[in-house]
Amino acid sequence: MISIPPNVCASRRLWAAITVLILALAGCGGPSTPQMMPTAIPLVETLPPADIPAPTAPPAITPTAPPAIVLSGAAEVSVACESNTLRVALAPDGEPIGAASRIAAVGDDLYLVLDGSLYRASRGGVDGGVADLEPVLLRGERVADRLVQEIVDLAYRPGDGEMFLLDKAGHIYGYDIASGETRLRYRVTPEAVVDLTEQLVAVAVGPRGQPVVLDTVFGRLWTPDDSDSLDMVAEAPALTDGVDFDLADGEFYVLRRDESIVAVGGATGSRGWLFDEERGLGLSLKASRHLGVDSLVIVDAVRREVSTLLVGDRTGAGGSRVLTRHVFAMPGIGLLRDAVFAGGRLYALADGDLFVFPGPASGTQTARCAPPGESSFARPQLYGVDVLAAMRGWSFPIEGGTLPVWPRVYPGASRVYRVGVHRGLDIYYWDGPEGYGEGWPVLAASDGEVVLATTAYTPLTADEYDQLVAGSIANGATPPDALFRFGGKQVGIEHGGGIRTVYEHLEEVDGVVRSGEGVRAEQVIGTVGATGTEGEARPDMSAPHLHVEIWIGDRYLGEGITIRETMWWFEQIFGG
């Protein structure tokens, strides 16, 4: 058994300061000022209320053009249910997807981000109940000297038909719809990194038609100067909590993790624009003119709502900015991730389904449904698995620990030094009277069977570390063998139902932990270390920490979805 050294605990305040400094040196930290993690969202048993309040009447304005869509009255909630909504399963090559995350409408086509790849489908086919998905840019394809890893966001520039695509690794691609060619607009360049690296979470089209990306580490908006560098567009402390953003009526509007929206109209600073404490989990914000005026469409994943808001300082009766609100009350619907208005209909993504409202079948456009009640929604699934039920009662892998506050340390974050994507959660210190460092015990999250336990290990040297990094850069992504070596000493546990956890960078693996043996929840399986990191190769270059991954089948928790949603899932599993 492992004996815990008496000096394993340091003061929390000292460890917090050291952690922020070392994270910056290692390129795997967070913003310069700590951010609060959102409060745990109640599970679906308490969402939403039986009587959803209707928004106030729309403002008395004269649109600059006739409205492009007419749904039910703007002064009430439009409810999409089985009787008036078409549900289309998304299955490229006949295989169900894990997560549909982004959607855009271009002419008669829809562009969809599914499991981190880009597909196209005709709206006519979708309206007929069939999504004939055509691959556009797939994971694993090479563009210039970089591999596509996971597309996380998209933005369309109608002027010349170019679509901007953001990769979780940090690359920005430009896809020409007419020619079908893809170019690298900006590539992550590890050689240029001298300090803390950006974390790019969303892309939009700027006022000059250029791609603009949202960075939550520095709280900035950037645009590529060339393929290897970024120029700052704007900065504001509020952007470190940014989730999604878009340009509307000459200003950037940014959706934040606390569900507020701020406006950025200059090079520095922001102004509060909207705060809605009723919102549950905002995942998407985009500009739209489907009502003939500049507006914002915001998607609330937990409440399954799509709201249209009037931009600028104009408001309607009662000071409301809400123009329309649409609620999906479908049995078994998952988290609502994105939506777009096109051709008189609303297209929305949830889990692996595409919903069309109003549905094209005869009579559905006038069918009305009751507002959803508490029992309207099943507990949301992820990758087809009820993970919240499967992981109910799980223990945090650090005794007394809490979830980190920085998006930068969650799965789906970029890892610029190796041109890769993070697949786990890094836990550096816990929020209590004392912090922890090397030698602190690591606990099994739940009962299970050990399937991986490092028993023989050769320390990582500086030369080997440099070779692994150089090989990753040359490859355009981190090769699997290098990724495993970067994990250091590890323990992997199968928990049943296709769910597995992996614990990496361990200083030691507990002597009783062996492959094929069972472990109990909260059993000590090892201790915190720095194996596999630059901190092992070059002491003091990065802090000891626990890297823990949750795998659901062959997908890590966070694959194919945004960091914001990933943080929500971890919050539901481990609490706040």
Image (spheres, helix red, strand yellow):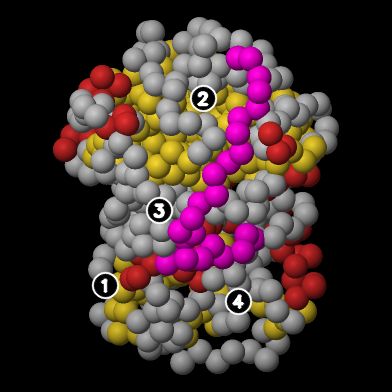
Q: In the drawing, what numbered circle is on residue 538?
A: none
Asked whether disc 1 touches disc 2, contact meaning CB atoms under 8 Å apart, the reply is no
Closest to the camera, between mark 1 and mark 3, is: 3
Distance between the alpha carbons at the discs numbered 3 and 4: 37 Å
- Disc 1 marks a residue whose amino acid type is Gly
Distance between the alpha carbons at the discs numbered 4 and 1: 25 Å
Closest to the camera, between mark 3 and mark 4, is: 3
Q: In this rendering, is residue 167 above or below 462?
A: above
* Secondary structure of the residue carrying numbered label 2: strand
User: Could you classify mark 1 by the number of other residues whose Cα lies within 10 Å: few (under 14), some (14-19), or many (20 or more)?
Assistant: few
- Disc 2 marks a residue whose amino acid type is Ala
Magenta stretch mostly in which secondary structure?
loop
Label 3 or label 2, whichever comes before in sequence order: 2
Q: Which residue is mark 4?
A: 401
Q: Residue at x 25, y 80 (%)?
A: 516
| Image quarter (top left, top right, bottom left or bottom right) of the C terminus | bottom right
Q: Which residue is mark 1?
A: 496
The magenta-colored residue range is 37-63
Residue 56 lies in the magenta-colored region: yes
Closest to the camera, between mark 1 and mark 2, is: 2
Label 4 or label 2, whichever comes before in sequence order: 2
Distance between the alpha carbons at the discs numbered 3 and 2: 32 Å
Residue 107: % across, % down: 39, 13
Distance between the alpha carbons at the discs numbered 1 and 3: 34 Å
- Disc 3 marks a residue whose amino acid type is Pro
Give whichever of 456, 425 is nearer the camera.
425
Distance between the alpha carbons at the discs numbered 1 and 2: 39 Å
Give whichever of 127, 534 is nearer the camera.
127
